[in-house]
Image (cartoon, rainbow, N blue to C red):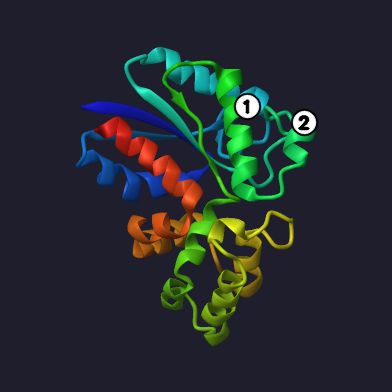
């Protein structure tokens, strides 16, 4: 049996891990415990400051050295104090997966714990939902929502390429078409309907992380 603590950005990611990732990997012998990052005393959710996140990562790494620790943070809207975020090398990256890989390497170097495996979602959790836009049909009566989301997905090589501008990030595109979308409620349910197999086939950066988890389980 191997253990992993997964520090999640918010309730949506925590539910996604608990309902989909954890049961899947438990069958392989890797037991994942999701933990929502704390932003201030009594408040959870959101990576608003790396200075507040780093101690939580290191604490998890040190309190159980036999376990692994990973993150499930959105690349979109990371704070400027995140390792590597303001560097010229990061600014020169044009592809989301390259940006995420660069910041993951900087994060691993800054945390500097042997049992830490950083991961950043490109560009945010909702990118996974663009793998199969038709799954939104159960949750909306608007006929054009599914077709419009599908057109967005078709314009990009992978859902991870849907960009990170404030008006065009995956969640913003969904909310523009479906204002009733509630991330903590709809997000995990739609993700579970899509399933890991479809997600990993369409999202290569996400798939690379899952492969690392599977290597741990093996």
- Viewer-side residue, 160 vs 5: 160
- From the image, tell me which residue sits under label 1: 106
Residue in the image at 56% along x and 79% along y:
145
Compare residues 17 and 38 and report the one nearer the observer.
Answer: 17
Q: Quadrant of residue 89?
A: top right
| Lateral position of residue 29 relative to residue 149, left or right | left
- Total residue callouts: 2
Residue 183, image x, y percentages = 53, 57
**Residue 74 x/y as whole percent:** 58, 44
Quarter of the image where the N terminus is located: top left
Q: Name the quadrant of the C terminus.
A: top left
Which residue is painted at 52% across and 43% down in the image? 10
Label 2 packing within 10 angstroms: few (<14), some (14-19), many (20+): few
Q: Residue 126 location in percent, x, y?
A: 54, 57
Dot 1 falls on a residue whose secondary structure is helix
**Residue lying furthest bottom:** 143
Q: Is residue 121 above or below residue 198?
A: above
Comparing 155 with 56, the one in front is 155
* Mark-to-mark CA distance, 2 and 1: 10 Å
Q: Is residue 151 above or below residue 103?
A: below
Q: Name the residue rendered at 42%, 64% in the picture.
A: 190
Callout 2: helix, strand or loop?
loop
| Residue at image point 69% right, 44% down | 77
Give the image location of residue 139, x and y in percent.
Answer: 45, 74
64 vs 187, left or right, is: left
Q: Is residue 218 above or below residue 130?
A: above
Q: Which mark is residue 87?
A: 2
Q: Are marks 2 and 1 in contact (CB under 8 Å)?
A: yes
Q: Dividing the picture into quarters, in which one does residue 168 lie?
A: bottom right
Q: Residues within 10 Å of mark 1 (few under 14, many from 20)?
A: some
Residue 86 visible? The answer is no
């Amino acid at each position: 049996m191997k253990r992993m603590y997964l520090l999640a950005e918010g309730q949506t990611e925590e539910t996604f891990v608990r309902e989909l990732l954890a049961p899947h990997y438990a069958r392989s012998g890797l037991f994942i415990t999701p933990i929502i990052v704390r932003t201030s005393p009594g408040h959870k959710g959101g990576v608003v400051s790396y200075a507040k996140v780093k101690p939580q990562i290191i604490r998890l790494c040190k309190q159980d050295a036999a376990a692994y620790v990973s993150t499930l943070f959105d690349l979109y809207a990371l704070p400027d104090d995140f390792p590597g975020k303001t560097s010229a090398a990061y600014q020169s990256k044009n592809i989301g997966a390259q940006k995420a890989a660069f910041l993951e390497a900087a994060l691993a170097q800054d945390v500097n714990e042997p049992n830490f495996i950083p991961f950043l979602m490109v560009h945010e959790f909702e990118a996974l939902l663009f793998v199969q836009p038709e799954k939104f049909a159960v949750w909306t009566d608007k006929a054009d929502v599914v077709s419009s989301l599908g057109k967005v997905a078709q314009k990009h090589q992978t859902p991870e390429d849907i960009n990170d501008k404030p008006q065009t990030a995956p969640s913003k595109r969904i909310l523009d078409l479906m204002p009733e979308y509630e991330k903590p409620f709809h997000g995990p349910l739609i993700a579970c309907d899509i399933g890991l197999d479809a997600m990993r086939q369409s999202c290569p950066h996400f798939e690379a992380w899952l492969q690392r988890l599977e290597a741990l389980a093996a």
